[in-house]
Image: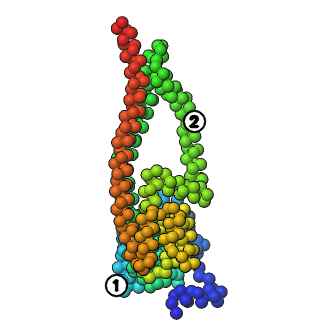
Amino acid sequence: MGAAGVQASLRGAGFERIGMGTFTYKAKTTGGQTVTGVLTAESQQAAMRMLDERSLFPIKVAEGGTAARATITGRRKKVRLRVLTTFYSQLSDLLRAGVPVLRALDVLSRQGANPLLAEILKEVHTDVSSGESLAEAMSKHPNAFTHLAVSMVHAGEQGGFLEDVLARIAVFTERQDELRNKVIGAMIYPCVLMLAGVSVVTFLMGFVVPKIKPLLERQQVPWLTTVLFAVGDFVANHGWVILGVVVALVVLAVGLTRREEARRLLDRWKLRVPVLGRILTMVAICRFCRILGTLLGNGVTILQALKISKDSAGNRILAEAIDQAAENVQRGESLAARLGRSGLFPADIVDMIAVAEESNNLDAVLVQIADSNEARTSRLVDFGVRLLEPLLLMVMAAMVLVIAIALLVPILRMGSAGLG
């Protein structure tokens, strides 16, 4: 009987396993010295008992390792995608070479390349050695392993192709990291332009305009100058109010995004916003097609594969459409037909899926769809970023030009009047 079977038997007999965890402690020795460290225990009370057995007086005992929580917020830190890519790839290689899961986790946790991941792997190792599956142990660490990765690992364990699933997750995570780095790198220059524009306008409105205003108030000025002075006075007199309103709106927006209804509205808006909506939709569809094709290629049933891959879309509206398609498939209907009726999937992708269903090579076609459309989406992102740069420059130039005209026209008039 395997470990999972033993665990199930114990639970059926009335024994419930107590989960182990990692705890960081700060304590004093009998000599008055302050020491810190990390230990593994069943609970916080058990950790304090262990410290007492070591003749240590506990000052602070907190769940999680020293590297597991941020210094300021105290929340669990996120593991970087690059680190996770290496972990998935190495774990896949070790399992493919015949190394048992527990031995592989122990080896990777002792490498110490990333302290946070090492601590998490120690906890995962403890849970797996206690009878839990790898997916169950990973699900306790959402700061490292996504719900999609846990679902795929669960499918791999059930189907006996865990090595292949881990390799696929590594590729998927690597591509996700590359896309994120590409977007961040592409947005650096536009953000610098925006920051420079805001700084220039702030300098003009905060220092230049107040010094010139007393010289121009004694004469008749154009309406543009009047509007500029009014805006400057409003910002100067109500600046803190404006800042408070902005902060309140940000807090309100953050609070609303935590509600399910607001998240659905936001996801719907993401799909419909011009240009950006098409990019986000194609990214989600490509991700869904790749995961679904990978799972089908590894022998996962289409219903289970749809249930897992719908979470990969990262959009509730798309996930609901995929879930409805799964219900149609369960009734014996076509997957392509329901996806087409949702209005979210492009017609060419729906046609390719329909043909693939008829020819019984859906897994290969889905991966092909992901490859081709990811390349198109990447080119669309590049074009959008290149278009954004001149637009920002034009906006900055227009704002500075308006301020310059509003100030220079009355100055030139005053000079002409003096000469006359």
Q: Residue at x 55, y 79 (%)?
A: 332
Q: Residues within 10 Å of mark 2 (few under 14, many from 20)?
A: few
What x and y, as percent, mark residue 184?
A: 38, 54
What x and y, as percent, mark residue 372?
A: 35, 65
Give the side of residue 42 with respect to residue 204, left or right. Answer: right
Residue beneath label 2, please? 241
Q: Residue at x 61, y 57 (%)?
A: 261
Residue beneath label 1, please? 97
Q: Residue at x 58, y 87 (%)?
A: 8
Describe the element under mark 2 as helix, strand or loop: helix
Q: In the rendered view, tell whether residue 296 sits above or below residue 172.
A: below
Tell me, yes or no, whether the two marked residues, 1 and 2, touch with CB atoms within 8 Å. no
Q: Tell me which numbered mark, 1 or 2, is placed earlier along the sequence.
A: 1
Counting every numbered tag in the picture gives: 2
Which of these two is toward me, 352 or 264? 352
Give the side of residue 278 with respect to residue 43, left or right. Answer: left
Q: Is residue 49 visible?
A: no
